[in-house]
Image (spheres, rainbow, N blue to C red):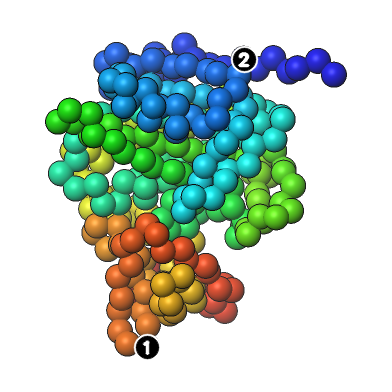
Amino acid sequence: MQPVTIRWPAEAIWEAVVPQLPGFTVEVLPEVDSTNSELMRRARAGQTEPTLLVAERQTAGRGRLGRDWQSDTQAGIATLTFSLGLVLQPADWSGLSLAVGLAVVQSLHPDLQLKWPNDVWLQDRKLAGILIETTSVGDQRFAVIGIGINILPRDGQGLRTPPAALTEVLTDVDAPAALLAVVPELVRMVRAFETEGFTNLRTAFHARDLLYGREVTCTDGTTGVARGVDAGGALLVHTAGGLQKISSAEVSVRPGALPDAPFGASS
């Protein structure tokens, strides 16, 4: 079987993004251990130009809390994996992963939802994951925003959450088309976050909030009903002891079943 040649829209992405990010480059690698790891290595070596790095195959992709992001031999077709690296200087970093998630769902499909703090779900299954890492380079902070999106159905064996695929809602989409849809909005959202923070994005997040009104169980022992996020992006959970805020990215949250009746936005 001959390898599939993928036509990536690098020039179209560059033209859409470079007005917002002078010096921006797009690079596609046939294989790398992890796009996040590669950009972090480059940053620590002094390479801090804004870069979109796409991998047709990852051999050691990483997710949040040290989990692996599995990538099969058809990763360039079935799973879109890429990272955006750039210098960021927000006044407050709180809520960045929520802003990134918003960029993904708003650029792809209205049925996609956000699971705090950094997953995209479709019909109670995981469609995409986000991993954000930063490193200091001189007096600047370099951020690497890694995103993995399931384009085609994949084997869910061994996964904690059943996987969803983007083709379930966009039947003709492929990895290059999804990349072109997401990246310009991602850059716009990140630059807006840099200047304005998360506060102005709270309402938009609420409209896509998978957890709102659902029973949740957190790995730190907190249980209760999710009540959205605050102005800094912390998860609000109504517990037996009152309203609790969860802001640590080290806390994993598992949703319970959907409630019998929907909760209104003003409840």
Percent from the top left, x then y, of residue 210? 49, 61
**Residue sitting at 45 percent across and 27 percent down?**
38
Asked if residue 112 shows in the view, the reply is no
Where residue 64 is drawn, which disc sits there?
Answer: none
164 relative to 217 in the view: left or right: right
Instruction: Say what amino acid the circle numbered 1 marks.
Output: Ala
Q: Disc 2 on helix, strand or loop? A: loop
- Tell which circle, 1 or 2, labels the residue nearer the N-terminal end: 2
92 relative to 27 in the view: left or right: left
Quadrant in the rendering for residue 259:
bottom right
**Residue sitting at 33 percent across and 61 percent down?**
248
Percent from the top left, x then y, of residue 93? 24, 47
Instruction: Identify residue for label 1.
Output: 240
Please tell me how crowded label 2 is: few (under 14), some (14-19), or many (20+) other residues with Cα within 10 Å. Answer: few
Instruction: Say what amino acid the circle numbered 2 marks.
Output: Arg
204 or 81, nearer to the observer: 81
Percent from the top left, x then y, of residue 45? 32, 21
Query: Pointers 1 and 2 in contact (CB under 8 A)?
Result: no
106 relative to 173 in the view: left or right: left
Whole-number angstrom distance, CA of label 1 to CA of label 2? 54 Å
Q: State which quarter of the image contains the N terminus.
A: top right
Instruction: Identify residue for label 2.
Output: 7
Q: Residue furthest right?
A: 1
175 or 81, nearer to the observer: 81
